[in-house]
Amino acid sequence: MIIELSHHFADFSAADWQPYHSAVENIIQAHGQGYHLFSPSRDVIASIERGCQLSLTQQQVLRFYIKERISILAGQVRSADTTILCLPNGVDLRSERANQISQPLGVFADLDACGPSRLITENAEVDGALLELVAETSGRQLGYGMPLRIEKVHGGGGTTGACYQAACKRARPCICIVDSDRKYLGDANGETARKVIECEGTQVHPTVCSIVLPVRELENAIPISALFEVYKDNPQVRSRVSPLIEYITHRRVTMTVDSSALDFVDLKLGLKRSDIARVPAAERQSLKQFAHVVSAAERALDHDDPSDETVVHAGVSMGMLAQVVSFLVQNGSERRAFVNRLMKSPAWVWMEDIVRRILSYGAAGERLPVRAT
């Protein structure tokens, strides 16, 4: 993240700085290692130079890579959606701008707090990897010219809540993003999401936050048209994608305004008639419309028999998200096309906020060399 210091520090004497030496040293070290970006004002830098006893390496980082690049850093501050504003311990934690998260500078006396920001997902190698790829690819387009540095943490599905609970007690910036596991718009969140939500209010530090996806799973955010490219060598899967394209086209042509079934259909395992019947009648319409479009055999049915296990749609693939990640990793030239599709899709309405959060938490620099004096 980008770390700023409030104007209070500009007038600090050497004695005033004494309790903050470790915190300032740790932040400068984090900047030098490319974990975060330190962007104090010129007046605060001058105050640090007067009042803090820094090592030779820290002096070099402050002089050559912060002070001499202050205009570039200030521009990055202006483009970031969220930054950290550090204030003196005991001062009212009021931010100077709406996009700042305020916290005492003393928090960074803990070296662990200065480590790379963390992204907790249920599966770091799949969910976490896809979110990181999307953020990296869209960063410049969203105003982020700095590198993305974020540590992906594997929550482990049902244990993600406990993983997030542990993060809530630490000072390191952290985002936890989980599937809602909802089967329809008005459904309750699944167990993992509920456990994460239960942690709300227990965060010791304001730089720890959680996001529950507004759709069933991250799979439901994937542009369906992109799956044709991902599975270009798998005609069997492509045949299961085609009805989903027809459904999207039908909604566009008929200008359907109800919630899209594709937000809540299980794209891995598919949909059965019984799945529709178990949804409350008031919430069933979008799923019934989906069934009528993707399968001609469903058009004369009311879908009100919870014992009917007939498959309406077989799903795309059990490993769909992993396959998408593998495709994007192996085909760098396809990433931009994929992200462009995503940015034009209905999912971008909510996905953009998530991507911007990841970009602001992961805003970092390059690991710096040490200059000889």
Image (spheres, rainbow, N blue to C red):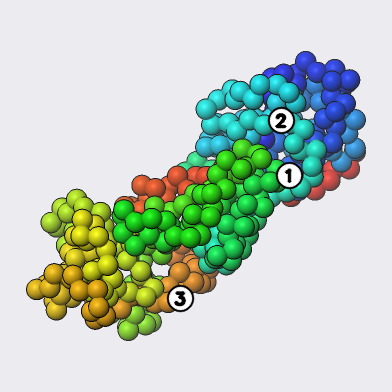
Q: Is residue 289 left or right of residue 46?
A: left
Q: Amino acid at mark 2?
A: Pro
Residue, x 31% and y 53% (percent of image)? 186
| Residue 157, numbered label | none
Q: Is residue 149 visible?
A: no
Q: With respect to residue 218, does 35 lie above or below?
A: above
Q: With respect to residue 155, does 57 lie above or below?
A: above
Quadrant into which the N terminus falls: top right
| Residue at the disc numbered 1 | 113
* Residue 282 percent location from the top left of the image: 21, 55
Quadrant into which the C terminus falls: top right
Element type at mark 3: loop
> Distance from label 2 to label 1 (Cα)?
12 Å
Q: Residues within 10 Å of mark 2 (few under 14, many from 20)?
A: some
Residue, x 88% and y 21% (percent of image)? 14
Residue, x 17% and y 54% (percent of image)? 256
Q: Residues within 10 Å of mark 3 (few under 14, many from 20)?
A: few
* Residue 270 percent location from the top left of the image: 32, 74
| Residue 104, numbered label | 2
> Distance from label 1 to label 3 (Cα)?
35 Å
Q: Nearer the viewer, mark 3 or mark 2?
A: 2
* Residue 100 percent location from the top left of the image: 58, 31
Count of numbered circles on the image = 3
Q: With respect to residue 306, does 32 lie above or below?
A: above
Q: With respect to residue 163, does 371 lie above or below?
A: above
Q: Amino acid at mark 3?
A: Gly
Q: Quadrant of residue 30?
A: top right
| Residue 319, numbered label | 3
Q: Is residue 197 left or right of residue 370?
A: left
